[in-house]
Image (cartoon, rainbow, N blue to C red):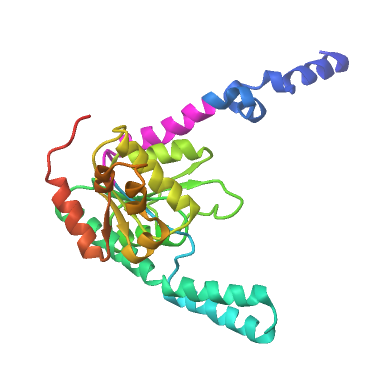
Amino acid sequence: MNPEEMERLAAIVNAPSYRLAEEDPDFLQDDELRPVRMQLELQKVEMALNRRQIHSTIVVFGGTVVVERQTAQTQLDDAQKTAAERPDDLAAARALARAERILAKSHYYDEAREFCRLVSEKNKMEGHHERIVVTGGGPGVMEAANRGAFDAGAKSAGLNITLPREQVPNSYITPGLCFQFHYFALRKMHFLMRAKALVVFPGGFGTLDELFDALTLRQTHRMQSLPILLYGSEYWKRVIDFQFLADEGVIADSDLEYFQFVDSPQEACKIITRYRLQPPVDF
């Protein structure tokens, strides 16, 4: 083969069209391939969990800013120092007020960790690894929940998602059970497909989105019957006036039965255990 032929052949085999489809990232990221990417994202997690014989989960949601007391205290100390140095700075005063509220919620980190330790230990005592703890895989309440399962020597999973911030999973997830998502919809589907209980700690938009997704699916009988526990009654009753929605007639009175308020790890465990003994509801 002369140099001219070799040059032509190199141009052919190095062109994107010659790549195997599965090895062509530009092709796979094309807008027209979105349905394929969604199917792959669904199947990857489904196959991995099935191979590990994980058929039921306890899902824990909650805010990323709900951190350990020591971390929250350090954040408050920094905010106090900044506010003292800039007494006329409204933004510094606002940051200080927010840091005080974050510290006030730090007990939820400990309680999420304790709850997940308790349920994980119970599942281990029963001789199996079903009803494993599943979180969004990030920091805050999610870290606390995975950490509680880790404390018990039990498996736990994390369904992480690519975001401008919070892309690194916490270090307490079981290796091989941490998954990364691009599509929120498929991530939420995997949260709920195997769920036997849903425990929702204080959080913001993301937590509210996940909560209302589950409540809507229960209201419309599009998912299995399960306990939905709102952990921290004082917080949740102020954030959402569910009774007002019922009084206004925009939800049914019976819709209020789809969730319960709880205020201790032991109370949450008792409700989940008792609910589990009821026969499944087939819609």
Placement of 214 over or under 122, stated as above or below: above
Q: Which of the image's four quarters has the N terminus? A: top right
Placement of 67 over or under 159, stated as above or below: below
Q: Going by the picture, which residue comes out furthest to the front?
A: 248
Position of residue 117 measured from the top left corner of the image (x, y, whole percent) = 27, 62
Position of residue 94 measured from the top left corner of the image (x, y, whole percent) = 60, 73
Quadrant in the picture for residue 105: bottom left
Q: Between residue 20 and residue 156, name the one nearer to us.
A: 156
**In the picture provided, is 159 more to the left or to the right than 232?**
right
Q: Going by the picture, which residue comes out furthest to the right?
A: 4
Residue 280 in magenta stretch: no
**In the picture provided, is 17 more to the left or to the right than 77?**
right
- Residue depicted at x 74% and y 23%: 14
- Residue depicted at x 47% and y 37%: 185
Position of residue 31 measured from the top left corner of the image (x, y, whole percent) = 63, 26
Q: Which residues are magenta?
A: 36-57
Secondary structure, magenta segment, majority class: helix
Is residue 69 something that shows in the picture? Answer: yes
Quadrant in the picture for residue 280: top left
Residue 55 in magenta stretch: yes
Q: Between residue 241 and residue 96, name the one nearer to us.
A: 241
- Residue depicted at x 63% and y 82%: 83
Is residue 152 something that shows in the picture? Answer: no
- Residue depicted at x 47% and y 72%: 101
Q: Between residue 114 and residue 98, name the one nearer to us.
A: 98
